[in-house]
Amino acid sequence: MFDILAILLSAIFVNNVVVTQFLGLCPFVGASQRFVSALGLASATLFVITLATGVSYLLDTYVLQPLSLTYLRIISFIVVIALLVQLMALVIRATQPVIHEVLGIYIPLITTNCMVLGVVLMTVRTPSSLAEAMITGLGSGLGFALMLLAFAAQRERLSHEAVPKPFQGVAVHMVSAGIMALAFMGFVGMSSSS
Amino acid sequence: MISAVLTLAGLSLLGTLLLSWAANRYPEDKKTLPAIIDQLLPQTQCAQCGYAGCRPYAKAIAEGAPINRCPPGGEALIKQLSDQLNRPALPLANDVPNTAPKQVARIDEPLCIGCTLCIQACPVDAIIGAQQMTHTVLADACTGCELCLPPCPVDCIDLVPLDETVGAASLQPAPYESPQPCIRCGECEPHCPKGLAPHMLFLHRSSETVAEDWGLNDCIECRWCDRVCPADLPLTQIFRQMKDMEQSRVAAKNEATTLLTRFEAREKRLSADQSRLKTRPSPGDASTLLTKIRVKQS
């Protein structure tokens, strides 16, 4: 139980994908104009990343490693992620038209989100169990969601503020993202070994 | 080498099978292009475009028909369609009757002979009356489509203009332009007795969803925000205008829905009539039955 919590917390805060590993920066900047769409994208990514780590872990442990084909990891994980995203897009389109309307254009983007592949590759490299792999995926997804939502909320507030001209647009977002990354460096000292 | 190829091929095959199963299990939803276009059309079902109604015209547009054939929608609709479909905005086609401004049919009642021909022609059941009885037009439901004019044998139907346009598309109220800027000081917010954010209402004054997003309709027009505003903005007055705009938006939307409901009810009634006619016994059946009874009696 403590292990699970430690993995989860370290994936969310200490090794946050966005601000300490610098993965998934494209949606972090590109899909954070509005809180609502950020929420949608965050939950879609959370779902895909959790499933993708699980499926990829199984594929790696039971197919790739026994056949000593670990050099096929990248290409086969890409196939797995693309498959999951397509499946999710189909299911959402048929069952949740409202979410599809808001997220329709973002869902295919998850396929090319380096964060999903990055987290999956890093998870399967460290020996663990299926549950641990999926919890790492979940934690990374939650960390991404936390950053994306915090940044979107910040941007919504910023859009109502009178920003000085030289800082308008991307500049002020860069600065605020930088400050957020700086703040997250405070978690680096945290250790789960105690 | 072989195992690598087989693994990748197997993985891809599995993925393909799974995806094709999912595509069959969850077919494309109803949010298709014709449905989206149909929502923009004014739902008068007037057939002035040359198609049987709004839905058939929407389908035709989706398949490439010109977007400038809807007179009730007018220029505003053409602009919306050209934005949505990424097609050039054209002026209204000149072979369709131009009915803007909105008109409604009126029956010159002393002349009406009660033939019911116009009742059958009306696409939204806006004419009431019976055989040998004077007919009349329900002005609220009439779309001014002129479909009742040709069938009338005594020419007793006129179209009278109504100083109001129809359909959600034609509605474009001018948003309030302020001479003074809102400095977003938020001074008004703590004063609002309804807990609204007047400065946000003001900033989003031209947004269509301002009522949902910022609770415009909760404003009780108490003028507290006017009094505390350091920029002296006439906030309450602006909110009143915004409420009017919102109301007309809702009214236009409701009108389109009502017309669609009436049209669909008519279609349903007509098809029910048709099926009743089909199952009715023919005169021949009755005489056979009578002969049978007579044979039995004798």
Image (tube, coloured by chain):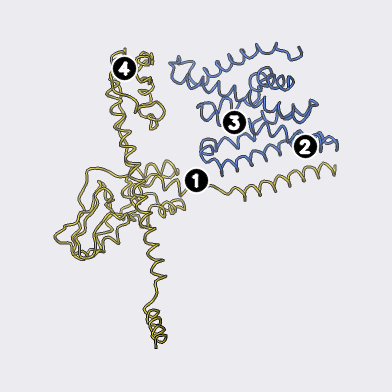
- Chain in blue in the render: A
With A23 as the anchor, is A66 left or right in this view? Answer: right
Q: Quadrant of residue A186?
A: top right
- Chain in yellow in the render: B
The disc at residue B225 is 4
Quote the CA–CA distance across marks 4 and 1.
Answer: 43 Å
Q: Disc 2 marks which residue?
A: A59
Marks 4/3 same chain: no
Quote the CA–CA distance across marks 2 and 1.
Answer: 36 Å
**Viewer-nearest of labels 4 and 1?**
4
Mark found first going from the N terminus, 4 or 1: 1
Q: In x, y percent, where is residue A18? A: 64, 22
* Subunit under mark 2: A
| Picture residue at 47% right of the left edge, 19% below the top | A157
Quote the CA–CA distance across marks 3 and 1.
Answer: 23 Å
B252 relative to A119, above or below? below
Mark found first going from the N terminus, 3 or 2: 3
With B90 as the anchor, is A98 left or right in this view? Answer: right
Quote the CA–CA distance across marks 4 and 3.
Answer: 39 Å
Q: Nearer the viewer, residue A70 or A12?
A: A12
| Picture residue at 31% right of the left edge, 33% below the top | B245
Marks 3/1 same chain: no
Label 4–label 1 contact, CB within 8 A: no
B291 relative to A149, above or below? below
Quarter of the figure with the C terminus of chain B: bottom left
Q: Quadrant of residue B189?
A: top left
Q: Amino acid at mark 2?
A: Leu
